[in-house]
Amino acid sequence: MSLKGELWAKNLDKVLEAATSNDKNSESSLNELKDFFLAKLKEGFLPFTETKKYETVTASQIYQWIHFRYAKFLDFVKTNEIEQPQKMFDVIAELYIADELKTPKDALVALYYKYGPNLENEVLGEIELQNAIYQLAIEKIEDNLDFSIGILTTPLGTPNPSHIFTELFFAVIGKSITTEQTHNILRHFSNITNRVDEKLILYDYLEKKMKSDPITASLAIPYIVDVAVNRSVDYSEFYDVVFHAISPESLSIPGRATFFNTLGRTVTSHSIPAQTQIAFAVKLSRMLLHVAPDVQLDILSVIQSLARAHENVMSLMTPKDTQIANVDSEISDVTPQTLWEVIALKHSSVSSVAEAARTIGQAVLPPEYESFNLETALKASKAKPTAQQTSSNWLGNLDKSVWI
């Protein structure tokens, strides 16, 4: 069957039926149908409207008849399970781009609702389509909260600020959601920040989550830093909240790298008080014996940054007879204490951990000196006298070029 030539009208219904079936010929029929509709859309004859001018009354009636099949095809996509969702999504996306009235929009939204993040196409960068998906997520929030959360946390083409997405964000956080769902939102919060059109809304939400349990707080902290910087918002309690967010559990969660990166950026600031520097170093050190080796390496990396940035922290590497600090209290209550845990890990059975502990406080070598071998260099730089050696003239006759 073909939609080319004089028999296209006779074959259209047959091709449409074949394209919407699941038999072996459905894909070729789907391509044939797509090409036919696409040609009519590009010619401007579809979609049919009463105000559109056609050459004759007969032509108007023909395109009204074709439009009915076009609408029937889109309705099938909206209401039925599709065997090859990505293939169908690509077909409908082409029609959507060519359709001046964006008639296939509802079919695309329906496909995305049924098959979600598995679908990819550049058409998802269209703001109008994005907003239609966000609106559906708002409407489905009572029946399918997971879908609505998925729309919040999944990249949808190019992220564009949207007041409808902001409404969706409000609607989701206004529901009674589980801790696991909250953590899912926070783990993917980078997909939210660029789409909410008022950043202070994000700040208020993150501020509340920072004052929650340590794991939730550790997930929220990295993003409130970025939001606060972008909006020039001051958060006077920031270091206190971060300090309380440090726990073996919060330091060990999947995706902890974001929290560690934020710790490294913020606690090494030269502007923070000496007491704050010491408190963070002591508490992080205390965590070392309660976490796995891979987490120990992350903690040691932050302590290394602290030691290099602050002499107060470096001094804690010298063994002293001090009281055991209470790291479960406030920052102001933490007394200086030798970082015994770091010192102990210098003898760790895990070689990478032992090496990281031993290098705490050491200066960073420039890259060109990282493989420098002192013994080899000394052997290659033996003094070469330019005159006959005697006990009296040996030093004076050294070849100066060796040392310059």
Image (tube, rainbow, N blue to C red):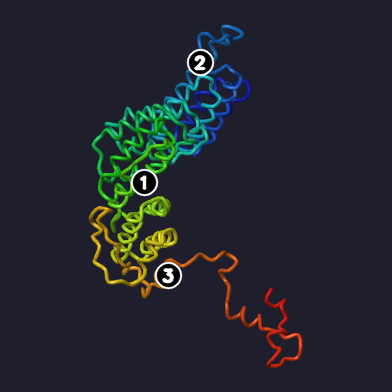
Which residue has dot 2 on it?
A: 65
> Which corner quadrant of the image does residue 310 belong to?
bottom left
Please state which amino acid type lies under the numbered disc 1: Arg
Residue pointed to by mark 3 = 352
Q: Residue furthest bottom?
A: 390
Identify which residue, 40 or 7, lies in the foreground.
40
CB under 8 Å between discs 3 and 1: no
Q: Secondary structure at mark 2?
A: helix
Label 2 packing within 10 angstroms: few (<14), some (14-19), many (20+): few
How far apart are labels 3 and 2 at the CA level?
A: 73 Å
- In the rendered view of the protein, which quadrant contains the C terminus? bottom right
Residue tagged 1: 187
| Residue that sits furthest to the front in the current view | 392
Badge 1 marks a residue whose secondary structure is: helix
Of 304 and 172, which appears nearest the observer? 304
Q: Nearer the viewer, mark 3 or mark 2?
A: 3
The answer to the question of whether label 2 and label 1 lie on touching residues, with beta carbons closer than 8 A, is no
Q: Amino acid at mark 3?
A: Ser
